[in-house]
Amino acid sequence: MSQQIFAYIAHKNGKADDTALELLVAAKKIDSSASVTAIVAGPDAVCSEVAASYKEVWKIGIDAYPNAEVIRRALVKVLPKGAIVLAPHDTFGMDLCPGLSVKLDSAYLADAVGFEGIENGKLKVIRQEYSGMVSTHVLCDISGGAVITVRAGSFKPDEAAGAGGKVLDKTGDAGDLSETTRRFLEIVEAEAGDVDITKSEILVSVGRGIEDKDNLEMISDLAKAVGGDVSCSRPIVDAKWLEKARQVGTSGKTVKPKVYMALGISGSFQHMGGIKGNPFIVAVNKNAKAPIFQFADVGVVADILEFVPELTEKVSEMK
Ligand SMILES: Cc1cc2nc3c(=O)[nH]c(=O)nc-3n(C[C@H](O)[C@H](O)[C@H](O)COP(=O)(O)OP(=O)(O)OC[C@H]3O[C@@H](n4cnc5c(N)ncnc54)[C@H](O)[C@@H]3O)c2cc1C
């Protein structure tokens, strides 16, 4: 029997998140014959955008900033028994999903990066442990439904997945959405900094592998040579070698470059969670088993302290 799978669509400023299309691919990986329904707790504009890819979109009309407490209550009312629910593994998904699975009395699985089909009522899920150095297979009993958060960027979106689906308004079934113990106060935007890396087309990003603040100059030189901007992972900001505005990741900026160079960066999910839009990723790392190579389009196993100056020289020569 084919599964009924629901994808919770994250959105911001009236636009669906990149994970909207990724969850559709993830759902089809679970069961290619599944009927996949998008759930949008938000405005009509997001529903119409998502309906271009999903056959069916359920709208829960909430104008306010997404509040996991309210949305969880609404989902418990509208979701059928035994549903499989996918949501992005971001801070909101982590807030929403564990409690949702408890209320639905279904299985909960966090941070899936792959699915390998269903065997005897159990879904084979791939997760990563030890900062991505080890992949594990987890069998998740989905006979009573499941709530699963999916790591952003783990499934390549299928841009051609045109569906022209219908939008069904489920707001009436969602119960009273006004009562809440949590209140939205304000959005605090991160400090702007001298460069807005969210607008950069080429990012030359540096991680702990750079070893010393003095070595950062070679990263700026490479960025200048390729016409990009310098960004970094969190340890570089923690060490106060670069300002917070250049940090990529779940607690930093979300970037959407065309090319992303990851130099001496291991590829933790908190870092990769900030890279959107499916850029061309070039990774340089001296550890051939570094998780970043699972995301890279081009991977170079090398010492960045030797490789980067040589690359800068070659790029400058070519110019
Ligand atoms: C709540 C929370 C939020 C977080 N938010 C973020 C975030 O927004 N952004 C973020 O980046 N991190 C974030 N982190 C931290 C994250 O978990 C990782 O610790 C961090 O991303 C690791 O940074 P890194 O890859 O630079 O360092 P490491 O993981 O230490 O990796 C360094 C890499 O460099 C390689 N290397 C070492 N020397 C060389 C050399 N000479 N040449 C080539 N390669 C070399 C190593 O093989 C290694 O792979 C967060 C963590 C938490 C708990």
Image: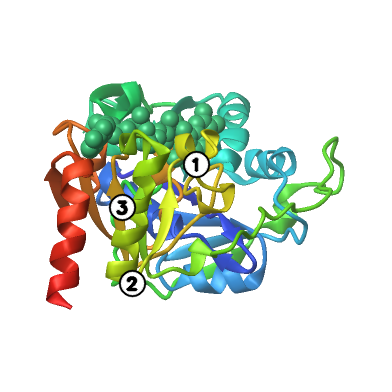
Image quadrant holding the N terminus, namely: top left
Q: Are marks 3 and 1 in contact (CB under 8 Å)?
A: no
- In the rendered structure, the answer to whether residue 78 lies left or right of residue 65 reads left
Q: Residue at x 37, y 58 (%)?
A: 220
Residue 6: percent from left, percent from top: 47, 48
- In the rendered structure, the answer to whether residue 44 lies left or right of residue 172 reads left
Label 1 Cα crowd, 10 Å radius (few <14 / some 14-19 / many 20+): some
Q: Which residue is mark 2?
A: 227
- Of labels 3 and 2, earlier in sequence is 3
Can residue 31 be seen in the rendering of this structure?
A: no
Name which quarter of the figure residue 116 lies in.
top left
Please say which color scheme the image uses: rainbow
- Of labels 3 and 1, earlier in sequence is 3
Name which quarter of the figure residue 118 lies in.
top left
Residue 54: percent from left, percent from top: 42, 64
Q: Which residue is mark 3?
A: 218
Residue 80: percent from left, percent from top: 54, 41
Q: Residue at x 22, y 33 (%)?
A: 290
The amino acid sitting under disc 2 is Gly
Camera-side residue of 181 and 168: 181
Q: CA distance from mark 3 to mark 2?
A: 14 Å
Can you say whether 98 is above or below 200 in the image?
Answer: above
The disc placed on residue 241 is 1
